[in-house]
Amino acid sequence: MRMHDDEELYDLADLFKLFGDSTRLRILIALSEGERNVNDLAEYLAMTQSAVSHQLSTLKAGKLVRSRREGKQMIYALDDEHVETIIALGIEHIEEGEHREKEI
Amino acid sequence: MRMHDDEELYDLADLFKLFGDSTRLRILIALSEGERNVNDLAEYLAMTQSAVSHQLSTLKAGKLVRSRREGKQMIYALDDEHVETIIALGIEHIEEGEHREKEI
DNA sequence: TGAACACATGAACATTTGCTCATGTGTTCA
DNA sequence: TGAACACATGAGCAAATGTTCATGTGTTCA
């Protein structure tokens, strides 16, 4: 891995912070199944509209999701082909950890 | 992506939290270049021994690094083949983001 | 135009997090 | 054995974070 300047390092940390919250993970996983508007997401995740909206705004700032307006609704979708890959790698890590524990 | 129970979701979030701090990222990147003991890491990263040790302990609990004793020293190394892949994907995301900004 | 809907956003609060400081544990070697 | 070294760890504190509550903005349609 090549060297990284401080700015890129902070950007990188900020990116992973987005994945470091179970609410945001659930939003990202939900969106990996397809586009959704805010109220649907809120209902699906059993959260308030406000909380979902705040998190979507955070995810959008981090360029993990994009949105478009459709009438009164805002439709959100994943905006990065890496999102699903990164989550899948994380899941692999966890499942291998569980596997290793059984071996011991 | 398949469905995830609550416990796995929290584990996943906790995993990504580990990557969500520039200090820990720097430790992981440093270790991707090879094993190191604690004092070397502290000097290399210009941090106190205590701060590095705390973070290493966090990383070890998350199974991203392992350690072995060598005399008085503790040698730390990456303990997961996914670590470098995950960081590399994060870097890709950021660099593509920068690229997209230039297009606009 | 104005009411109703869908969503965004600012402020406030409780929780979490990362660091420092002080001290504890484990190892080596004279 | 005990001093010196290398590292771990608990407590405490300031900063960051996620949620709620209240309210603001944008859109539709009668």
Image (cartoon, coloured by chain):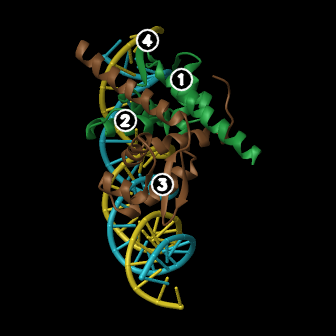
Chain colours: A brown, B green, C yellow, D cyan
Labels 3, 1: one chain = no
Tag 1, which secondary structure? helix
Q: Chain of mark 3?
A: A
Choose the circle earlier in sequence order: 1 or 2: 2
Distance between mark 3 and mark 1 Cα atoms:
28 Å
Labels 2, 4: one chain = yes
Q: Residue at x 61, y 33 (%)?
A: B91
**Residues packed near mark 1 inside 10 Å, few (<14), some (14 to 19) or many (20 plus):** some
Tag 2, which secondary structure? helix
Residue that badge 3 annotates: A56
Question: Which one is in front in this view, the residue at disc 1 or the one at disc 4?
Answer: 1
Q: Residue at x 49, y 24 (%)?
A: B83
Pointers 3 and 1 in contact (C-beta within 8 Å): no
On residue B71, the disc is 4
Distance between mark 3 and mark 4 Cα atoms:
50 Å
Residue that badge 2 annotates: B12
**Residues packed near mark 3 inside 10 Å, few (<14), some (14 to 19) or many (20 plus):** many
Q: For the residue marked with disc 4, what is the amino acid? A: Gly
Q: B79 and C24: which one is in front? A: B79
Q: For the residue marked with disc 2, what is the amino acid? A: Leu
Distance between mark 2 and mark 4 Cα atoms:
35 Å
Question: Which one is in front in this view, the residue at disc 3 or the one at disc 4?
Answer: 3
Question: Which one is in front in this view, the residue at disc 2 or the one at disc 4?
Answer: 2
Q: For the residue marked with disc 3, what is the amino acid? A: Leu
On screen, residue A30 above or below D13? above
Q: Chain of mark 2?
A: B
Q: x%, y% of residue A56?
A: 48, 54
Distance between mark 3 and mark 2 Cα atoms:
19 Å
Q: For the residue marked with disc 1, what is the amino acid? A: Glu
Labels 1, 4: one chain = yes
Pointers 1 and 2 in contact (C-beta within 8 Å): no
